[in-house]
Amino acid sequence: MRFLIQLLVVVALIFGVSHASAIIFWAMGSWSAVGFEQDGSQTHMQFGENLPRPEWVPFYPGASIVTGSKLTRCASRPDFIRSRFRRAPRSTR
């Protein structure tokens, strides 16, 4: 572990912090997460350097990609919303 930190410090001093962060993100690999919105819908998030890129983002020749992200929102479930916000029955006294 100490060797890795020393290597990252040397790379950051010689080549810059962006190259050191590229090594860190390469070692971490790609990962994903799921977020739950207030209305019950889900948002899928993916992070990594090998995700498909949009056509409208320019990439210069020889550029290295450190990381990218992709967000996908799923449709909400109305039955889940109805069951969550149902009124409590009135008590009979």
Image (spheres, rainbow, N blue to C red):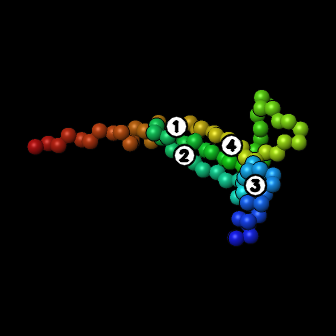
Q: Position of residue 16 (x, y in %)?
A: 77, 50
Task: State which mark lies toward you, 2 or 4.
Answer: 4
Callout 3–callout 2 Cβ contact below 8 Å: no
Q: Is 12 drawn above or below residue 70 in the view shown?
A: below
Report the residue that reaches farthest toward the top: 56
State the residue position of label 2.
Answer: 35
- C-alpha gap between disc 2 and disc 4: 14 Å
The answer to which quarter of the image holds residue 71 is: top right
State the residue position of label 1.
Answer: 76
Q: Which residue appears at 54% of the width and 46% of the height?
A: 35
- C-alpha gap between disc 1 and disc 2: 13 Å
State the residue position of label 4.
Answer: 69
Q: Which mark is residue 12?
A: 3
Q: Earlier in the sequence, mark 1 or mark 4?
A: 4
Report the residue that reaches farthest toward the left: 93
Nearer to us in this view, 53 or 18: 18
